[in-house]
């Protein structure tokens, strides 16, 4: 099992609703080009959820990276807001607050870490049979220090 990325995408997007669709399109094209159409629906759904969080709550420039490796796909979304996502927030009236719950249930692993300018939320989808799904790691860290 190699850690070498076969294909990589890096993009900076504005904190605008249309950035969600743009990122989804870029990631889908990358996965198609890497012959990983088998995970496109899951990866683009979870990417949409995490990017939507950045648009709605961080309201800063959004970094999107996607690495396709032989055994997994890793997506990382960065923003410039230092605050941790509120994992307990859920607004039933607006049907919001479920994104990270979906990531937790569908990704093989995921987490949040501080960057020099804010935070990053990442997740990995693995090739079927290489890891148990739904096991999250490094979910939250203290960003106040």
Image (cartoon, grey):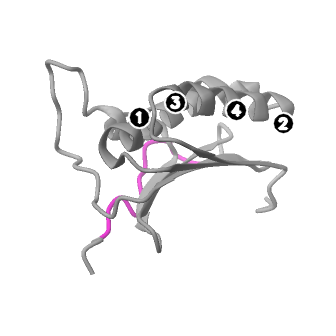
Mark 4 = which residue? 26
**Residue 20 numbered mark, or none:** 3
In primary-sequence order, the first of circles 1 and 3 is 3
Q: CA distance from mark 3 to mark 2?
A: 21 Å
Residue 35: x percent and y percent?
Answer: 84, 31
In primary-sequence order, the first of circles 1 and 2 is 2
| Marks 1 & 3, CB-CB < 8 Å contact | yes
Could you classify mark 2 by the number of other residues whose Cα lies within 10 Å: few (under 14), some (14-19), or many (20 or more)? some
Residue 2: x percent and y percent?
Answer: 80, 61
Q: Nearer the viewer, mark 1 or mark 2?
A: 1
Q: CA distance from mark 1 to mark 2?
A: 25 Å
Mark 1 = which residue? 52
Residue under the point 75% across and 25% down: 37
Q: What is the magenta range?
A: 131-141
Q: Nearer the viewer, residue 1 or 87?
A: 87
Secondary structure of residue under mark 4? helix
Residue 32: x percent and y percent?
Answer: 80, 27
Q: Quadrant of the C terminus?
A: bottom left
Q: Main secondary structure of the magenta part?
A: loop
Residue 87: x percent and y percent?
Answer: 23, 47
Could you classify mark 3 by the number of other residues whose Cα lies within 10 Å: few (under 14), some (14-19), or many (20 or more)? many
Q: Is residue 143 magenta?
A: no
Mark 2 = which residue? 34
Secondary structure of residue under mark 2? loop
Answer left or right for 143 relative to 79.
left
Could you classify mark 4 by the number of other residues whose Cα lies within 10 Å: few (under 14), some (14-19), or many (20 or more)? some
């Amino acid at each position: 099992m190699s850690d070498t990325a076969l294909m990589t995408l890096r993009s900076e997007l504005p904190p605008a609703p249309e950035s969600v669709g743009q990122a989804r399109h870029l990631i889908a094209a990358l996965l198609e080009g890497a012959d990983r159409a088998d995970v496109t629906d899951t990866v683009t759904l979870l990417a949409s959820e995490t990017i939507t969080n950045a648009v709605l709550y961080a309201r800063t420039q959004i970094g999107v990276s996607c690495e396709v490796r032989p055994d997994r796909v890793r997506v990382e979304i960065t923003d410039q807001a230092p605050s941790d996502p509120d994992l307990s927030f859920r607004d039933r009236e607006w049907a919001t607050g479920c994104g990270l719950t979906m990531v937790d249930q569908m990704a093989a692993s995921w987490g949040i870490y501080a960057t020099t300018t804010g935070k990053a939320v990442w997740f990995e989808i693995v090739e079927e049979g290489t890891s148990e799904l739904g096991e999250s790691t490094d979910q939250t860290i203290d960003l106040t220090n």
